[in-house]
Amino acid sequence: MATDVSQDRLSGTWNFNPVHSSASFAVKYLVASFRGEFDKVDATLADGQLSGEVEVASINVKDENLAAHLQAPDFFDAEKHPKISFRSTKLTLDGDKAELDGELTMKGVTKPIHATGTVSGPTEDFMGNTRLGFTFETTVNRTDFGVSWNADLPKGGKALSDEVTLTVELEFLKAA
């Protein structure tokens, strides 16, 4: 049976560990998935309330020219909207399964999202720290957030899918 995170398992304050955390995306471009990630990720977890953000300028893709284009107004508009943020409204656990509801803000637009994933821990590491990890995934329509660049293909259709899969892996250490 699922329970809200007000339970003892996630109570208290947890410190974010950026070394073992990531935020990435995947979107179909032409015939394959295009992937990228954000190098600067931050998150907080306190009494079951999860929030986080990524710095748009820290986007990491395999092509420098494309990285610059992704920061332009056609995509994330990093100058006007330097961060993408999330705030949970409900976090539910059922064993190692986790469900997350909340609000995602991208390019100045806030929309509700639902993500599913897993929770690991809490567990004690070899130095006596209590660690907790989450992996969440959701799919959003990028055009709902004003990320609307696309190109028409010669035989019909569009070059870039509107559906984008977002994945975060987050690690926290229990605050003393």
Image: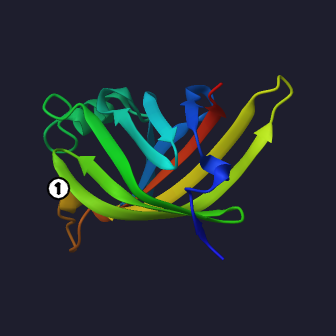
Task: Judge left or right: residue 29 versus residue 154.
Answer: right
Examine the rendered structure and indicate whether residue 39 appears above or below residue 4.
above
Residue at 44% across / 42% down in the picture?
36
Q: Quadrant of residue 20?
A: top right
Specify few, some or many for label 1: CA neighbours under 10 Å numbering under 14, 14-19, or 20 or more: some
Task: Judge left or right: residue 5 versus residue 145.
Answer: right
Examine the rendered structure and indicate whether residue 151 appears above or below residue 37.
below
Residue behind mark 1: 148
Q: Quadrant of residue 89?
A: bottom left
Residue at 23% across / 72% down in the picture?
157
Query: Disc 1 marks which amino acid?
Result: Ser
Q: Residue furthest right?
A: 126
Q: Position of residue 161 (x, y in %)?
A: 31, 64
Task: Judge left or right: residue 65 versus residue 52.
Answer: left
- Quadrant location, the C terminus: top right
For label 1, the SS is: loop
Nearer to the camera, 12 or 114: 12
Nearer to the camera, 153 or 48: 48
Q: Position of residue 114 (x, y in %)?
A: 41, 65
Residue 23 seen in the figure: yes
- Quadrant location, the N terminus: bottom right
Q: Quadrant of residue 14?
A: top right
Q: Number of callouts in the render?
A: 1
